[in-house]
Each structure stands twice: as structure tokens, then as C-alpha cells.
Amino acid sequence: MEIQFIGAAQEVTGSKHLLKVNGKKILLDCGMFQGRRKESAQKNDEFPFDPAEIDAVVLSHAHIDHSGLLPLLVKKGFNGPIFSTHATRDLCQFMLADSAYIQERDAEYINKKNMKKGEPMVEPLYNVDDAMQALNQFYGVGYDRAFVVEDGVVACFYDAGHILGSAVVHLIIHDKETDEQVRLAFTGDLGRKNIPLLRDPVVLPESDYLISECTYGDRLHESIQDADEQLIKIVNDTYKKGGKLIIPAFSVGRTQEIVYRLNIALNHGLIPDFPIYVDSPLSGNITEVFSAHPECFDRDTYKEFIDNRLNPFGFGRLKYISRVEDSKALNNHQGPCIIISASGMCEFGRVVHHLKNNIEDEKNTVLIVGYQAAYTLGRRLQEGQEIVRIFGVQYRVRASVFVINAFSAHADRSDLIDYIGRVKGVKKVFLVHGEKDQGLKFKDVLLESGYPDVVVPASGDVFPLNGDKLSEKFKRE
Ligand SMILES: [Zn+2]
């Protein structure tokens, strides 16, 4: 029995780990690489294994860096089951289709250029049909329900508290050749305690091996309460100035979280009732998926909304905008308003247009609430650059720019230490889903805390998994 690390190994995207046991190959996550365009295109295009030989996929959650290559896996011959929670499956319905649409548009754009230069045409990485075929292979499973992945491999999802439907995965594996039993756990992306809407991460059962994310393994977030107060102040200040508050946010998770926080603030009379627009077709669909999965909500959400038959994502003067014309009409909106729009890093999508149209007016405010990767417009605004290029034109940043990091959906260093510390029996930890530096720093922290064996695997690294002989275990028990 062995595990091979393929993606999110010394980097943050492309989550993919391959478990081999009893002649079967089981893939944990099948995420897309994101980052510098050329490099990620190459990494996405080539699987270092034959997709037709994969027997099953176990998917931790719907974010594209964990699910985004499922349609390509299917296109290249994978015909087995994809296990996920019900909410993850429903989110993937929109996210994989949207991803396919982006791939098709990208290919179209490249082909237009290639045609002019007389160069050969390219194919999209995958199309909407591939995404739909992948959806057809999903098996939805509820939290805390054990299920058989393959003969000898039983898995169970527990709430990861990261986004709707997100799971930490626990596998009990019986290697029939050696008669050994191994308990392998995989955090996927781990959330934080007290994130609104979602439950706190559930502690994994006893595990021999733990594959843990470490995105923020070297950092501590600000307190959520301070962040809420900051958000309320920014909303009120923008309202008084009569400006627009533009919040770039990813369609899944952050958008619903901000809407939910604004809803609570309005209910409690902390912000004025003025127009709020969620401008992204995907956000509207994703919000419907959230509404359809109250089984994933925490007690507070129930008390505040579900028990009172209120919609946590619909209130006051909030509008979801899907048509392009309605999005463009926001340019002529008079008076103060809030616009929440994707993409979260301001690289593409409608938010780029809103920034272009509003960034030079000092009445307006831009609020950054998510991780901004290097070389993105979001990162430039976050860094306080005075002049930015948007669609090739230079704009002077006169709007106020604020950053709130505490709304991150990822555990920080102390959350991770606390979580890992509560999993019993761990004899080896693999740190994935973090830049190499973060991984190595967090490895030192774990070694100091007394974990004897911590590894930050590189892509391609293979490790044997050993456990107790089942026959001897029974004898002992
Ligand atoms: Zn995630």
C-alpha cells in the first residue's frame, strides 16, 4: 500500500493524491493547477498516470483547485465513481460547467490569434459535455456515513467547515496482500471555528497517517469580531460619502458569507438599508445551492433564520444580477450602494469593469476580503499601488482601499496546530496545499510540538503506508 503526491505538493493548487492498494488506484481530489498561465496549462494537460486506470475518486470539496480536472479525467478515460458530499456534488454542477465555459472561451480566444498568425488550432482542456459526464459519475454521501470506495477501502466524510459541503476524509484501508490495516486521513481544506453559516471543523477519528493542508501554516488571522466591526464601519462610511463599495469575492463561499454578515448587521440596525447587488450569474446559482443544503448550516444560522423561515441570502434591498445588461446598468446607479462581484482576485469577470468605472472616484471604496495571488490586480490594489492597469489602460486609484483578512475560510497556524493535536494516533504527517516555505516552517512547528515524523512531499514523491497486521490486532483485542 502506498500514497503518491501529485498536486498541491509544495504549492497551493492542483490538489491530487494517489492511493494504491489491492491492485486498485484511488485518487483523492482532482484539482486544477492555477497560477502563471503557461506553466499551469502544461501541468493541467498531462496526468502522470493513465486516467483509465483510476478506479475511484474521493473528492473533499468543490473548489476548482480540488475538483477542476474531473472533467478532463473523464474525457481521458476515467469511468469510475466520484464520491463527494451531496452539497459538493450540487456545487460542482455549476462550478465545473462554469470552468468548462472558461476553457472553451480561452481556446476560442487563442484560436482567433493563431488563425491570424497561421498557427495550428488548439482544443479546450475540456468542454461542457465533459463536465456533465463527470457529474453523471458522482455518488453523493452524507456526513458521518461510512461507505465502500473499493474492496478493502472504507471511507467517511466529516464536516471540514471550509465551504458548503466541504469534508475531511477518513479512510480505513485493509491491504489484503500484507493483511495490514491503515487509517489514513485527509483534511482537504480545513476551515475555521466560528465561520458564519458553517459548522466548526469536526475532529477526525484516530488515524495512523494524516495528510494536512497548510495554506496559512506560517500565519495568524485577525479576530473575526474585529473584522465584523471593520466591515460595518466601512459600509457606514461609504454610505455617508454617497459612494459605491466594491467587494471582489469568489462566487463560492466568500460572497454568501459577506451577504450573510450584511444581513445580520441590517437586522441588528448596524447598517442602513440601501441597495446591495451581487453581480455574477454564478453567485446567484451557487446561492441557490446554499439554500438547498441547510443540513450543512450551523446552529446560529438555524436560530437566526431557518427557525424563523427567513432566507439568510435574501433581505432588504439585495438583488442578484445575472444579465449582462443589468450589470452594465450599475455604472449609471445614482447614490450609495454595495457591489459584490467575482472574480475574487480581480483578474477576470465583471468586477474588473466595476473597478475600471469606479476606481478614480474618491467617494468609492474597494474592500479586499480574500487571498490575492502575486501578479493579480487584486494584489496591486492590496499593496496600495497608486496607478494600476486595467484592460491595458492606466487608472489612478482615488477610491479608498481596505483589506480584511480575517474572513479567510482557511485555518491559520494556531487552528491547524489545535486541529492536528486533537487527531489521535498520528505517526506521520504529510503537509500539502502550502507553498514550500510555509510547509517547511509549519513542519518545524510540528516537530517542536513532538510529532516525530513530518514530511513536506514534492510532486511525484511516493511513501509506503504500513499498519498493524489485522490478525494480530484481533488477537490483541
Ligand atoms: Zn478550498
Image: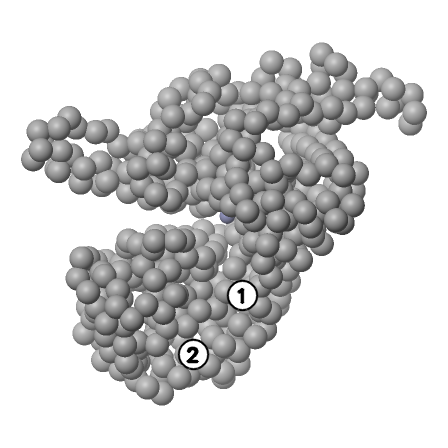
Pick whichever of labels 2 and 1 is earlier in the sequence.
2
Quarter holding the N terminus is top right
Quarter holding the C terminus is top right
Is disc 1 surrounded by few (<14), some (14 to 19) or many (20+) residues within 10 Å?
many
> In this image, 208 relative to 407: left or right?
right
Q: Is mark 2 within 8 Å of ligand 1?
A: no
> How many badges with numbers are in the image?
2
Q: Is residue 98 above or below residue 6?
A: below
**Residue 444 showing in the rendered view:** yes
Of residue 320 and residue 158, the one placed in the foreground of this image is 158
- In the rendered image, residue 222, in percent from the top left (x then y), is placed at 57, 68
> In this image, 337 relative to 402: left or right?
left
- Tell me the element at label 2: helix
Q: Amino acid at mark 2?
A: Ile
Q: Which residue is mark 1?
A: 406
Of residue 5 and residue 311, the one placed in the foreground of this image is 5
Asked where in the image residue 136 lies, by quadrant, the reply is top left
- In the rendered image, residue 79, in percent from the top left (x then y), is placed at 45, 21
Q: Which residue is mark 2?
A: 234
Instruction: Name the residue located 59 percent from the left edge and 54 percent from the top edge.
Output: 218
- In the rendered image, residue 347, in percent from the top left (x then y), is placed at 30, 54
